[in-house]
Amino acid sequence: MQLDPRLSEISLDGFQVVSGQMFAHLPRKSDATCTLWPTSISFSKQAVVLLNNCEHIRIEINPTTKGLLVVPVTSKDQDGIRWIKSIKSPAARKIECKTFASQLYDTWGWDKSLVYRATGRLFTADNKVLMLFDFANPESWKSREAGEKNA
């Protein structure tokens, strides 16, 4: 490659490589994600797809590790919730859950003016496929909803 003669040469002494791990990974459409607002929860379409488009799930929380576990269940499970809009076109929906979200924010010491998102991974336990979202180091940003309420 021919260098432009108008460019000046500099010394690279003192420069250090910045690790790529220091930059936030913004989830792509191919990632299963869970997003928590101070009053609701939602999941990406990919999360639904990875759990075989099941209609109902149960959510389990680990307050110590900040893990949120999604367990596919039948409609008969007393703690199950419908997480898809329609069986004909499975896609996740935003689920209002003010009491749950508020308690979770309090338990995990989160700022209620922020929204938090984590990616999920499939695991098995007791011969069932589950999805674990690790909220120990979530992506977060200022909630527009909180700003609108304070305006």
Image (cartoon, rainbow, N blue to C red):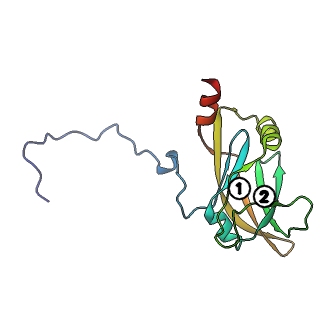
> In terms of depth relative to the viewer, which is nearer, 80 or 15?
80
Quarter of the figure with the C terminus: top right
Quadrant for residue 70, please give it: bottom right
Q: Is residue 143 visible?
A: no
Up the image or down, 50 lies above or below 108; here it is: below
Single out the residue that lies furthest toward the top: 151
Q: Residue at x 75, y 71 (%)?
A: 54
Question: Judging from the image, what secondary structure is the residue with disc 2 in?
Answer: strand
Classify 10 Å Cα crowding around label 1: few (below 14), some (14-19), many (20 and above): many
Cβ atoms at labels 1 and 2 below 8 Å apart: yes
Q: Position of residue 125 (x, y in %)?
A: 83, 69
Amino acid type of disc 2? Leu
Q: Position of residue 136 (x, y in %)?
A: 70, 46
Residue at which label 2 appears = 69
What's the CA distance linking mark 1 and mark 2? Answer: 6 Å
Q: Residue at x 71, y 70 (%)?
A: 51
Residue 12 as seen in the image, left or right of residue 143: left
Residue at which label 1 appears = 133
